[in-house]
Image (cartoon, grey):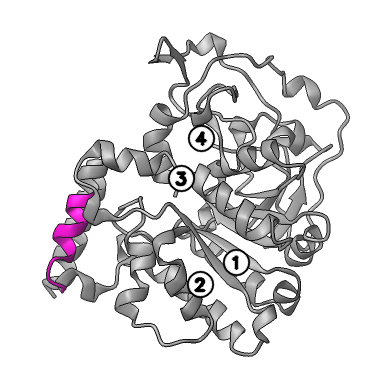
Amino acid sequence: MTSLTHVFGALLFVVLLTTVPLSASAQQGDRPPAVPVEPIGTIIEAFKTHNIVALSDADGNEQNHAFRLLLIRDPRFAATVNDVVIELGNARYQDLMDRYTRGEDVPYASLRRVWQDTTVPTAGNNYLMMQQLVEVVRALNASRPRERQLRILLGDPPIDWDQVHTGGEHRKWIEMRDTFPAALIQVEVLAKQRRALVLYGSMHFQRRNLFSNYDMENWQAQSIVSLLERSMPIKIFTIWQQSLEKLPVNVTSWPVPSLAIVRGTTLGASDFTLYYPPPASRFTVSDGKIVQIPREDWRSLRAEDQLDAVLYLGPSSAMTNRGSHEIPVALCSEPGFLDMQLKRIALSGVPQFEADRLREYCASVTAK
């Protein structure tokens, strides 16, 4: 979830400066433009040379959600890939998820704890999208032999909210939101020589952390991708969903959906901040204290040094996103649910607007 990454990014992703500045515009030269290609076949082909392909999570975006379901349903996917690692899934319930995707009877009230009890207690938490994703995997597995069934790996740290009473106790779990899934992938995927599609917010795919001015000395600056690539002799194929309006490319003739490799192209030479809204501040640590880096000391980074490909699902004007209505209406009337969510939001330090929109949504649907 990128929303919470934004909130905690300035506090958790802070490090010393050591990188050399780059001038992305000066690197454009005579590079060729990026070429759009058919995305699903290209992603499946990438698994021939990469054990891990990382695809930007839907994060409420309906076009992204539809695309990832299309990808997973493709017969070539289950024939090639073993695991799907998801961000919005509390690892405490891994056994429950394994039983569900194998086709066993699991009550929905138990299943929803997978995404309801994550470290990120936002108002929506993409309840319905998560439900649809796991239902698709379960349906696909029903027609496949056990050894070729897809496994959903829950990447969120196994927080037990009953044992969390302070913001400091919650912060300990938040600090594991990259280290835990990286270790999970090492043990459950790479050590077993399996292949996995990783569905996470794209900022978890950074090779160099934008918030830390691209310095990676500090452990807090690490991402899932940087941790894995630094600890093992592997390269992860990372795909960021992009609208591309701000980038040097004419997409009016591009099919929807399309995928384009960025290395060696004008897209690859572009500054990374064109791909992601630049933060208002960047930070370092001095004598154990968080220090803001002056704007004139900000570094630049070519996009091709940060990501491998972009997924184009249409212009920003065509994108549709789900919000609080991701919560099933019945939950608003369920005794204790609203109070529980509001308590978790307050405890975690999530912006007040998350609590406000949850109250407003539940008030509107229960009044009908």
Q: Which residues are magenta?
A: 334-344
Spatial separation of the CA atoms under disc 1 and disc 3: 22 Å
In this view, the mark in front (4 or 2): 2
Q: Secondary structure at mark 3?
A: loop
Q: Secondary structure at mark 1?
A: helix
Pointer 1: what residue?
68
Q: Earlier in the sequence, mark 1 or mark 3?
A: 1
Q: Earlier in the sequence, mark 4 or mark 3?
A: 3
Mark number displayed over residue 177: 3
Spatial separation of the CA atoms under disc 1 and disc 2: 9 Å
Q: Secondary structure at mark 2?
A: helix
Pointer 4: what residue?
277
Question: Looking at the image, do the residues carrying marks 2 and 3 touch, with CB atoms under 8 Å apart?
Answer: no
> Percent x, y for residue 338?
17, 62
Decide whether residue 335 is among the magenta residues: yes
Spatial separation of the CA atoms under disc 4 and disc 3: 21 Å
Spatial separation of the CA atoms under disc 2 and disc 3: 21 Å
Pointer 2: what residue?
133
Front in this rendered view, residue 230 or 130: 230
Q: Is residue 246 visible?
A: no
